[in-house]
Amino acid sequence: MSVDDREPVGLHATGPLDYLWQLAKARRGPVLASTAVGAVWILPGALLPFTVGEAIDAGIAGGSSGELVRWFLATLVLVLVQAVTGGLLNQAAGLAGLHASATTQDLVNRHVARLGDSLLIRARTGQVMSVANTDVDSVGEGFETLGRTVGAVVGLTVVVVVTMSHSPVLGLALVVAVPLAVLGIGLLLKPLRERNEEQRDELEGATSLAVDVVSGLRVLRGIGGERVFSRRFREASERVRATGVAAARSEAWLTSAGVLFPGLITVGITWLGARLALSGVIAPGELVAFYGASVFLVLAITNITEAIGTLSQAKVSAGRVVSLLGLDPVLDEPDEPRAVPAGPLDLHDPETGVTAPAGELTVVVASSKASRSLARRLAHYPVLDYLSDPDEEEDEDDEDFEDVEIPVNHRRSVLVGGVPVADVGLGEVRRTILLAGHAHRIFSGVLRAELTSGRGDGADAPTLEQVLAAAGATDVVEALPDGLASELPENARSLSGGQRQRLVLARALYAASDVLVLDDPTSAVDSYTEAQIAEAVARLRRGSTTVVLSRSALWRGVADHVVEIEDDPFDDGDDDADDADDADDADDADDADDAENQAIREAAR
């Protein structure tokens, strides 16, 4: 599957604020529209108390019906303007939030696709899921509330200026009181941000645990591990609840302050205005206007307080997005890509000495760990240590993604058709060399679309029926309710490991790539079925280069060439670990699902 090489906006942001700024610049239309409309929308509410006050003083107290009608019409215009701009603000704010969340979602998806499976040892599954869902929504909500926040600030400023022009004493009181209220509210912001981050981290852990439970549910039932996982999930849920209560408590204090401080301003301004009115300094209409203005200030400061919480969460979420974007792809595109020659291609690894002649079937016999590493190297993937458990090694309290050093092991590049794969563009490498591992996943969706999505332009490509028969998957499809039209869940969890493995093999065969690398493709099937699959694959791939890494004698029996590797070329010197690995591989030869293996290890702890 190719990934669009266009660099999305915000990919190289230096921090959360820089990311939000780049996002705003990229979508400046909706952002500017929402802020401009927000400023216009708030003005009628800010000016309305003063028009009412003028109507009282000039129209009622002054006894002028003409002035009363004039200020009544002015009030009506303000109400109509606020009604119209309110609808426009909802549309503009929603559009700004939608653009921000959609752009962030697209950016996260593209970058995760660029990182590939190297992300598996850099982050927990729950971390990535939380970024792709919770954080994306939080960023969108931050942009959605931006227009109203700007409007509230503009309205607050207008009220202070107009009040100052009518009564310098009351205006000065507002100039002093409003910053003090905002400062008091701001002191509660830091604890809220800290509580939100703590809840976010605990939620990630619970999400990761839930993913493990779902992916390994069948194995858990088989070994009786439901109670262990149930207890661990309850404990994780309790931690999420505790941090959520703490965050809610901080938010409650913030909300209370947002009501208390503006309320004190209203009481103070009303009291002071009444004293000035009784002394004849201001007119009765101005007293009404100042009271209405103080009520407006309560609403404005409340909106600002709520926006502070939303924008604070958006900043935290933007930081999580930037942390994910800070992970660099392991493989780089060559500066001057070379083309792969046409025709059948041979594959040669100068590091291990493995050579797969063009158009023939080569079987490589090695330890399970060496096979896995060699398969990835032959297909130009970074060699990862899947024997380590990233969730075990990672500090659960660490909120950042870990940009660990990943060994690429391409000291001397593999040659395809005599051309180093490191000198070929990644897109062409992926189209030319296809790696199919025994634990590769089946995506959710219609089965036919899943099996046929990787087809190239080969004229001699086999039909879907042919590859299903060769992979021994015809009976798997026939057993499904709607056959190839059946809807499968994520990773086809409704199927057994052997059934999923055969569908993965069928998908790889249907792609009809020039070079096909199969890593232990039949480890989860019985010997009779494996023999049939080996013979059928050999016939189907005749004339195309195929490399099978397997210790099965059945595959060696149909091979054109057999290469045996006694020593692990990727050995890190830990002989005891390698011996234990070989023993584990022998015991687990029938288990093809890495997620289920992880669930077993988790339940056993």
Image: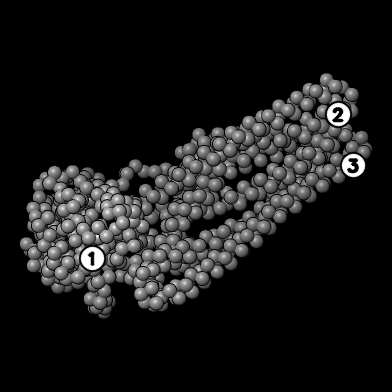
Q: Do tag 1 and tag 2 residues touch (Cβ < 8 Å)?
A: no
Q: Rate crowding at label 2 as few (under 14), some (14 to 19) or many (20 or more) other CA atoms within 10 Å.
A: many
Question: Could you say whether the residue bearing mark 3 is in a helix, strand or loop?
Answer: helix
Q: Is residue 422 above or below residue 272?
A: below
Amino acid beneath label 2? Asp
Q: Is residue 421 above or below residue 363?
A: above
Q: Which residue is mark 3?
A: 275
Q: CA distance from mark 3 to mark 2?
A: 18 Å
| Among the 4 quarters of the image, the one containing residue 384 | bottom left
Q: Rate crowding at label 3 as few (under 14), some (14 to 19) or many (20 or more) other CA atoms within 10 Å.
A: some
| Of 58 and 222, the residue lying toward us | 222
Amino acid beneath label 3? Arg
Upstream in sequence: badge 3 or badge 2: 2
Q: CA distance from mark 1 to mark 3?
A: 85 Å
Count of labels in the image: 3
User: How far from the left and from the top, in percent, is residue 491?
Assistant: 33, 59
| Among the 4 quarters of the image, the one containing residue 412 | bottom left
Residue 556 horizontal side relative to residue 200, left or right: left
Q: Which residue is mark 2?
A: 57
Q: Residue furthest left?
A: 560
Q: Which residue is mark 1?
A: 372
Question: Could you say whether the residue bearing mark 1 is in a helix, strand or loop?
Answer: helix
User: How far from the left and from the top, in percent, is residue 156?
Assistant: 70, 40
Q: Can you tell which of label 3 and label 2 is closer to the viewer?
A: 2
Q: CA distance from mark 1 to mark 2?
A: 87 Å
Question: Could you say whether the residue bearing mark 2 is in a helix, strand or loop?
Answer: helix
Upstream in sequence: badge 1 or badge 3: 3
User: How far from the left and from the top, in percent, is residue 184?
Assistant: 70, 53
| Of 367 and 98, the residue lying toward us | 98
Residue 429 horizontal side relative to residue 143, left or right: left
Residue at 58%, 62% in the rendered image: 244
Upstream in sequence: badge 1 or badge 2: 2
